[in-house]
Amino acid sequence: MRNKRTELFVGCFIVLGVLAFVYLAVQVSGLAFSGKKDTYQIVARFNDIGGLSDRAKVTIAGVAVGDVESISFDKELYMGLVKMNIVSDVNNIPTDSSVAILTSGLLGEKYLGISIGAEDDVLVEGDEIYDTQSALVLENLISQFLFKSDDSEE
Amino acid sequence: MKAITDLGGWLLNWLEAVGRAGIFLAQSVFRFPVRLNESINLLVKQLYSVGVLSLVIVVVSGAFIGMVLALQGYSILAKFGSEDAVGQLLALALLRELAPVVTALLFAGRAGSSLTAEIGLMKATEQLSSFEMMGVDPLRRVIAPRFIAGVICLPLLSIIFSATGIIGGLVVSVGWLGVHDGAFWSLMQQSVYFDTDIINGFIKAVCFAIVVTWIAVYQGYECLPTSEGIGKATTRTVVLGSLAILALDFILTAAMFGDF
Amino acid sequence: MVDAYINVQNLSFSRGEHVIYKDISLTIPRGKITAIMGPSGTGKTTLLRLIAAQLAPDQGSILVDGQNVHALSRSDLYKLREKMGMLFQSGALFSDMTVEENVAFPMEEHTKLDRDEIHRIVSEKLHSVGLRGAAQLMPSELSGGMARRVALARAVALDPDLVMYDEPFTGQDPISKGVLVKLIRQLNDAAKITSVLVSHDVEESLSIADHVCILAGGRVIAEGSAEAIRASEDPQVKQFLNGEPDGPVPFHYPEAESSDKAAL
């Protein structure tokens, strides 16, 4: 049956296409099909966000616990306003924690690292982390080193 | 003065041709599902000749392009000591650009030219007139299933191309060049995003599919029904199709990935 | 007055600069075989396409069974075409279907007959053209004469009122020609079909036609019964029938006119 054979091949072709799609989604992009995780949002203001981008990861002790939602400019304080979503499971970040913009490797992507504080109160939806450490900008670093200037950066 | 008149005339002719092709497309697609059962049979036949028969060339080219990318990428990345990023390079290059563009170019050469030639030959042997004489619309019967099959097949082929390309690159970089496979995957997963990279690549493939198949069936339908006419139409399909893909790719890339 | 099935009135048609018909009128009687003859390039095939409304005339009208075909809506036209069969010059069998599927195609499209019924009619039609044994072959496996007989079976599958034959004898060996002549005659007499035959094969056409029209230079130069045409004294008609190389129809193509190959 010529017709049945054609149908079989076409069926295989479509299955192959779908499998390849799932493979790309899961294995290549690391997409998790567990649905959208519950998150809560916190904000932080930085003097210099230096190359941080949307959807960069947020880590605690090197483990990803969320990502950056948006980056905007705070007109009144002249600072970079970063909104980030943290997964609900991690609901015990002390309010006096600090956040820094870090770089993976020498030239890698920028990401946020949260260092845990000591307070008993924890951050909830809409809270702000006040203790921030800006991105390491190579030019500033070099000029500090060369001129031994002592204006410290927050 | 004459040059300006010529330019105006050229533009009007061109617009008229595009308009005719647009009406042609609309007529064939919107009249398609007259009888579902028969339509599906016709579609399956075309999916076979357009899609399944293009599979080999796509898989083979995908694997080789992936392997070459891995080799080239490795030799440069190794200079910076970041040869682990070869997976990232491979996946982004394939998903965003190479898979949709190369698959569409191969598709224009393999399936597009054969669609044009087939439809042109049906015209030359009066089969299209014959459908009309039997009160059957050739647009619905001949053009629509071919067009729809093309639009379904090319995105699927493009995805298969990406997957085989990544596997080809994996074999070369991990199996042969000794890249650490954990780093290969994790760097790839870190930098590839499902919605921006995979979905955007898919959207590109769908756009290319519409344009290439449209050009192919229209050239076949409008060709002069002689052996010379069919030959010219087939060439035009490949040339116009390829140029359209590359131009459209620039526009789509600018819209999707260009952060202005 | 003959009972006209098709009435062509004051028809003019041109392709670009090239005038093909200039104000011609002719009638095709019901239930008879009409042969339309003329030298190559006089647009005989074009006339068939005009009758089937695949082309639209510049002026004039064509009435088929009392309906002006060029004033019909698309769906009415398609309905009218179900009553027309056409045998194309090349046969025009659908190359992706078997012989049987080809003949069954018009019935599957336009009737609600079930599979067995269609199968029975297909066998019958193929039997009438002597090709029942070839039902499972693909068109590419047929000889030219066989393909034309299959196309004939397909053209009459819906028992049409009108069958148009476009150059049925061209490129056929004498035996095939004889078979086709016999088949056309049989079909016409058995089913009371109106047949229109376009040809430049003088002998075959005159032998079966009841009514003959000769076209030349965009005009009708003679119209009448086969005997009347044979007896005609008109020099143009005589030249055509006897195949004289030169005469009123010039041997040389006029030089000043455009040589548009697309015009038939």
Image (cartoon, helix red, strand yellow):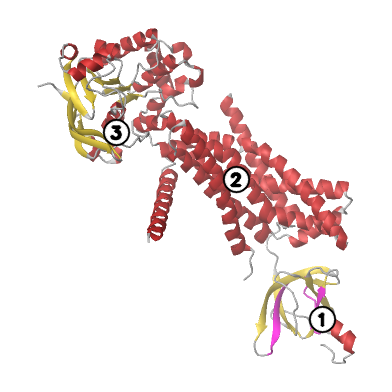
Which amino acid type is shown beneath numbered disc 2? Leu
* Same subunit, tags 1 and 3: no
Q: CA distance from mark 1 to mark 3?
A: 81 Å
Question: Nearest the camera: C156 or A44?
Answer: C156
The answer to whether residue B238 is above or below residue A94 is above
Which amino acid type is shown beneath numbered disc 1? Glu
Residue A101 in the image: x percent, y percent? 80, 77
Nearer the observer, disc 3 or disc 2? 2
* Same subunit, tags 3 and 2: no
Of the 4 image quadrants, the one containing the C terminus of chain C is: top left
Which amino acid type is shown beneath numbered disc 3? Lys
- Is the residue marked by circle 3 packed among few (<14), some (14-19), or many (20+) residues within 10 Å? some
Residue B52 in the image: x percent, y percent? 62, 36
User: Chain ID for label 1?
Assistant: A
Which residue is at 62% across, 60% downward?
A: B253
Q: Which residue is mark 1?
A: A139
Residue B244 in the image: x percent, y percent? 55, 51
* Figure quadrant of residue C131: top left
Give the secondary structure at mark 3. Answer: helix
Q: Which residue is mark 3?
A: C79
Mark 1 and mark 3 residues within 8 Å of each other at the beta carbon: no
User: Chain ID for label 3?
Assistant: C
Give the secondary structure at mark 1. Answer: helix
Q: Is residue A69 visible?
A: yes
Q: Is residue A88 visible?
A: no
Classify residue A67 as left or right of residue B180: left
Residue A56 in the image: x percent, y percent? 74, 70
Question: Nearest the camera: B59 or B220?
Answer: B220
